[in-house]
Image (cartoon, helix red, strand yellow):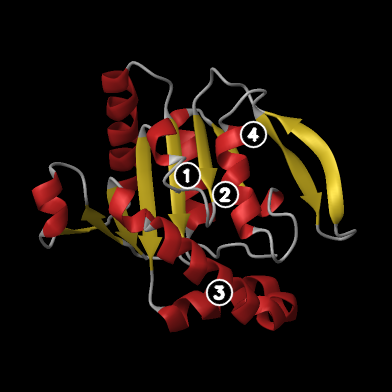
Amino acid sequence: MPDQAGAGAAAAVDRAGSSDRVASAPPVLEARPGSVPSLADRARAASTGAHRRAVVLIDGRSGTGKTTLGQALAAALGAQLVHLDDVYPGWDGLSAAAAAVVHDVLGTPSGYRRWDWERSEPAAWVAVDPSAPIVVEGCGALSRAAAPLATFRIWMVADDAERRRRAIDRDGAVFAAQWDRWAGQEDAFIAAEDPASMADVVVRS
């Protein structure tokens, strides 16, 4: 399945602040072991300032390290964690999962229909607490419709060859056979939604 491999050393590109900062080259911050607590602090501050629960969206292409960062941030925030790998309805399901983030995961009733990859069919409904902090990770998480529902938005990037190596090392021949098929959907989503432009922080792994 289109899962993300863990990121090693990372660099964060700060995209927060005014629109004129986004137009110029943002500063690159070297990510150290303290980066996750720093990101968690920013996520808490953003939700406090908005007087809302923390809703963190982590997006990026396959192999950029979304799963690893999502797990770390969810643990730091005491948040629920939703992997879009559990939501995609098969290998052609990126756009459907992006819609599910808005209408189901962050909608009412809150939750999602889990996809059974072994049977290639929908499985049980998984409920999500609409009042508790939540981290949603996966390509398709940060769309134009989802961005206003979030309090903190992260886009992840990595070298293409390294992304592929990580993903194939993790998921093997199954993902290797589907790599181009999935990459085409990533291309279409990025072209339509421009998720990087909506991110508060860009993390390079």
Amino acid type for the residue under numbered disc 2: Ala
Report the residue marked by disc 4.
104
Are there few (<14), some (14-19), or many (20+) residues within 10 Å of tag 1? some
What mark, if any, has residue 183 been given in the picture?
3
Foreground tag (1 vs 2): 2
In this rendering, position of residue 165 left or right of residue 90: left
**Lower position in the chain sequence, tag 3 or tag 1:** 1
Residue 202 seen in the current view: yes
x and y, in percent, of residue 162 in the image: 45, 79
Amino acid type for the residue under numbered disc 3: Ala
Relative to the observer, which residue lies in front, 80 or 197? Answer: 197
Report the residue marked by disc 2.
98
Q: Secondary structure at mark 4?
A: helix
Are there few (<14), some (14-19), or many (20+) residues within 10 Å of tag 4? some
x and y, in percent, of residue 80 in the image: 57, 31
Q: CA distance from mark 1 to mark 4?
A: 24 Å
Q: Residue at x 35, y 65 (%)?
A: 9
Relative to the observer, which residue lies in front, 45 or 89? Answer: 89
**Lower position in the chain sequence, tag 3 or tag 4:** 4
**Lower position in the chain sequence, tag 3 or tag 2:** 2
Q: Residue at x 64, y 34 (%)?
A: 104
